[in-house]
Amino acid sequence: MSEVQAKAPKRILILGATSGMAEQCGRLWAERGDALFLVARSSDKLAAVAADLKNRGASFVDSAVADLDDTNHHPELLAHAINSLGGLDVAFVVMGALGSQEAAEKHFPDAHRLLHTNYVAPASLLTWLANYCAQRHAGTLAVVSSVAGERGRKSNYVYGSAKAGLTAFTDGLRNRVDREGVKVMTIKPGPVKTAMTQGMKGQEKFADVEVVAATLVKQIDKGTDVVYVPGIWRIIMAVIRAIPERIFKKLNL
């Protein structure tokens, strides 16, 4: 019996389960027999993903259609998901939206929606999940932020600022709950080929989502604190952060 087969199935909650990154990670978890609970907004897409993961060998698949922007319903939703799974080993928080920087610059309601989806709503989910896991001294919270949060750029500073806030939130959360036996993993992807980035300039250079997913599943198993995917982005962002502001503000980024 292989090492993977010998391990007990993990109970994994995927929040934002129909995103390209989440779907690919879900396939890898299903193929090794993990138990999955999926949450997404689109009932049709969610049903298709759930059926696919069942066919791929997941030991258990359940789902709930929900608007994760609705923070008032997070406690009820998360309690239902964990009860359905019979506990929780991993929560994978993949919700987010690129939105339109141009629209957000002109109309604050557009900016507010981006800030809410990319920071406020994930922070709400993580607060509940962290408290649940801390009480049980176990669990991993894997959270997708972005390299866009490393430094504000004119092309996406509304989205980037929300991701910067989410990164800081997960940093502080990790500092709070690590001593309680809870792992908090901050994931910082560069551009990845998914439906979310379709049509963006330079897409031919974006990372393959299957390669990214394989890296994430491996690092979530290891309990790594911070992961850049692909790894080259750790170096790229170190260079970008080091550019003096007097120069950086004149760059067309």
Image (spheres, grey):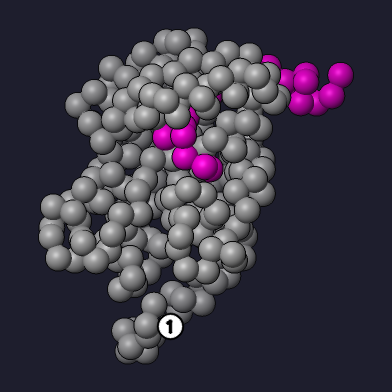
Q: Is residue 93 left or right of residue 2?
A: left
Q: Is residue 123 left or right of residue 146?
A: left
**The one of 231 and 196 positioned closer to us in this rendering:** 196
Percent coordinates x, y for residue 222 in the rendering: 64, 39
Q: Is residue 70 above or below residue 190?
A: above
Q: Is residue 128 above or below residue 63?
A: below
Quadrant the C terminus occupies? bottom left
**The one of 168 and 10 positioned closer to us in this rendering:** 10
Percent coordinates x, y for residue 252 in the rendering: 37, 83
Residue drawn at point x = 35 percent, y = 34 percent: 126
The secondary element bearing badge 1 is classed as loop
- Which amino acid type is shown beneath numbered disc 1? Ile
The reply to whether residue 11 is visible in this rendering is no
Query: Which residue position is annotated with label 1?
Result: 243
Percent coordinates x, y for residue 134 in the rendering: 41, 26
Residue drawn at point x = 36 percent, y = 13 percent: 80
Residue drawn at point x = 69 percent, y = 26 percent: 31
The part of the chain drawn in magenta is: 1-21
Q: Is residue 174 left or right of residue 112?
A: right
Q: Is residue 146 left or right of residue 8?
A: left
**The one of 230 and 123 positioned closer to us in this rendering:** 230
Which quadrant would residue 57 be assigned to in this image? top right
